[in-house]
Image (cartoon, rainbow, N blue to C red):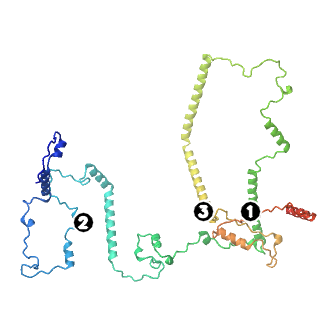
Amino acid sequence: MSVVKKKKRVSKKNKKAWGKYSDIRDVEEFLEDQRLEERLGKFETKPDSELFVVDTAGDNEPEKKEDGEETKPLSRKLQKRAKLKEVPKCFEVLLPTSKVQDPNAKRNKVNPIGSKPTALSKLTHQRQAKKGVLEKKLVEAKKNRKMAIDKKRKAKQVRQNFSLDLWGGDLPEVKGIPSTLVDEFISPEAQLHNVLPTQRLRPKPPLAKTVVTRAAVETPHPGVSYNPSYKEHQELLQQVGAHEEKMMKKEAHLMRVTTGMFRRVTQQEKENQWREEMSAGLPQPHNPAEDPDSDTDNEYKAINPPVKNKKKDHKARRKQKEQLAEKERLKRQKIDKKKITDLYKLRQLKSTIKTREQKQSEERSKRAEKRAAAEATALPTLSAHKTPIKEPDFVDPKQLSGDLRNIKSTTNLLRDRFESLQRRGALAASKIMMKKKRKLKSYFKPGHKVTEKDIEKYVTKSAGKKRS
């Protein structure tokens, strides 16, 4: 123990001064030794086999067994196997190294939460058992266990069926997908992402339903023939007439709801209405002929004559109350009578409700059939433009030739095929986009010599443009 020189003239009147100027290192060293003995154990309690080792072989001499045979050194493989039983050094930190005993020897053991069933948990357990929840869980667990065992067994089985087509198009190896990505848990997008671009085989998208189901060339009506029969020609004529009537009716309806809603006014009526509207609110000149009170004397009469405060007497008030009570009584009597009549009308109401529901169901089914038929024949909408509707073909009886030599074409073949592709959904509907021609204004440049011929030429040119 080192000797510390005593400082002179030091005040130790408080606790801070005692801790600052007092030497307590010997006490701290003693307490630290005691704590170390508690952690590692006291030397008095340890046996001699743990403290001392008897060396009987020496440094250079090899070890010998009890029979006198020399022991060979272990190979590296055997040394690794022997070390497998030992605890790894990375896990030694987690093991308890202290040998300090619990200061409270009678400490109560506390079970973790959920290990001991409570009264509430027992009650819920019983309720679940009555409902069959636990049985269902046990059945599902048993089923999952069986599935896991079967899957493990299948994985161990050796393949005995060699009927697999290695050149088939459905195999992932043929598509260029690596063998490491051939798994049921890996999505096809991830598999395709890892395939080289040169090996990607993308399937051709299927055609639209309208392209597949609808005929490319529709069968025309027999009345369109260059030599039709009278009956077929008349049938086609009736169809075309009905179509034209429908279109005319549509146009008339549009005219009625737009232009026809506003009545026509002549120019004179328009001027009179404008004059009346503009002169509204202005003081008009007094016309004595139009004055209704011109025959009476010039007496002053108020616009709002005074009202007399004539109060009702007791008899009038009593009669008024009686009338109100009688009116309320009749109203209540009418309501009660209606309730009684409604009770007798229950059968009639039931029958009317039943018939109404039946009628509604029939109408609903008809609407569904009509909607399905409309969807089956509906034109595809692939763009913002409307798909052109096929107009009915008709040949005038005067233009019927009777042979193929003198026949005249009424439609354009290229346009017909193009619209057919649009109606089937192979092409998106479009409309003709024409470029607007720029209007060039011609004039005589100032400073240039203009002759009479130039003027005549300009006048004739401008007149021709106006006529066209």
Q: Looking at the picture, how far across and down is residue 134, in whole percent?
A: 31, 58
Give neighbour class at mark 1: few <14, some 14-19, many 20+ (Cα, 10 Å): some
Write down the residue under mark 2: 90
Q: How far apart are the two marked residues, 1 and 3, measured between alpha carbons?
A: 23 Å
Q: How far apart are the two marked residues, 2 and 1, measured between alpha carbons?
A: 92 Å
Q: Work out whether residue 304 or residue 395 is closer to the camera in this orientation and state it.
A: 304
Write down the residue under mark 1: 243
Q: Going from the N terminus, do you reach mark 2 or mark 1 first?
A: 2
Can residue 220 be seen here? Answer: no
Residue 372's mark? 3
Q: Going from the N terminus, do you reach mark 2 or mark 3 first?
A: 2
Type of amino acid under label 3? Ala
Q: Looking at the picture, how far across and down is residue 299, in whole percent?
A: 80, 17
Element class at badge 1: helix
Which residue lies at the image location 61% right of the left edge and 22% below the top edge?
Answer: 320
Q: Work out whether residue 78 or residue 132 is closer to the camera in this orientation and state it.
A: 78
Q: Nearer the viewer, mark 2 or mark 3?
A: 2
Q: Nearer the viewer, mark 2 or mark 1?
A: 2
Q: How far apart are the two marked residues, 2 and 3, measured between alpha carbons?
A: 73 Å
Q: Quadrant of residue 239?
A: bottom right
Q: Residue furthest front?
A: 8
Which residue lies at the image location 42% right of the left edge and 83% below the top edge?
Answer: 163
Type of amino acid under label 2? Cys
Which residue lies at the image location 77% right of the left edge and 47% below the top edge?
Answer: 262
Q: Work out whether residue 439 or residue 134 is closer to the camera in this orientation and state it.
A: 439
Left or right for 18, reference 264: left
Using the image, determine if residue 383 lies above or below residue 312. Answer: below
Give neighbour class at mark 3: few <14, some 14-19, many 20+ (Cα, 10 Å): few
Q: Quadrant of the C terminus?
A: bottom right
